[in-house]
Image (cartoon, rainbow, N blue to C red):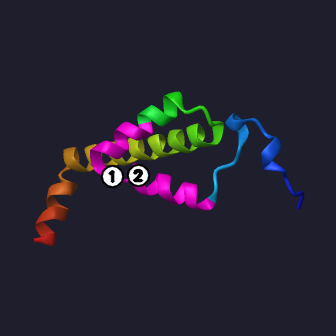
Amino acid sequence: MANINTSKLPYEYTPISMWGYFGYQILFSIPVIGWIFIVIFALTAQNINLRNFARSQFCVMIIWLFLVVIMATSGLFVSMMQNLM
């Protein structure tokens, strides 16, 4: 595997570290504040890798929202909540 010298890359192309992805994942999972950061980073992040990661998280958020709406309208959500209580 080729060793990439990241010090010569422009900032917008520098890779995000594993801990960076981990931290952003925790930040994005905070209910309201994280969602705001997802939108901000998806639209305005200078680093392309961070912008793409935020966009992927935004897509996941939309899929979850869509599934919750489907479950709520079909009555499945109410049935699942009654079984938990």
Quickly name the residue at label 1. Answer: 30
Left or right side of 10 for 44: left
Q: Alpha-carbon distance for marks 1 and 2?
A: 6 Å
Q: Which residues are magenta?
A: 18-38
Quarter of the image where the C terminus is located: bottom left
Residue marked by disc 2? 27
Between residues 19 and 34, which one lies in front from this camera angle? 19
What is the quadrant of the N terminus in the image?
Answer: bottom right
Residue found 55% across the figure and 33% down from its top: 45
Looking at this view, is 63 or 5 the one in front? 5
Disc 2 marks a residue whose amino acid type is Leu
**Where in the figure is residue 39, as x and y percent of width and height?**
42, 34
Q: Position of residue 8 (x, y in %)?
A: 82, 41
Q: Is residue 55 toward the left or the right of residue 63 in the image?
A: right
Coordinates of residue 34 in the picture (x, y in percent): 36, 45
- The residue at the point 84 percent across, 50 percent down is 5
User: Does the magenta portion include 44?
Assistant: no
Question: Which one is in front, 45 or 53?
Answer: 45
Outermost residue on the top side: it is: 44
User: Which type of secondary structure does the marked residue at label 2 adopt?
Assistant: helix
Asked whether the residues under the numbered discs 1 and 2 touch, taking CB atoms below 8 Å apart as contact, a structural biologist would say yes
Q: Which mark, by number, is residue 41?
A: none
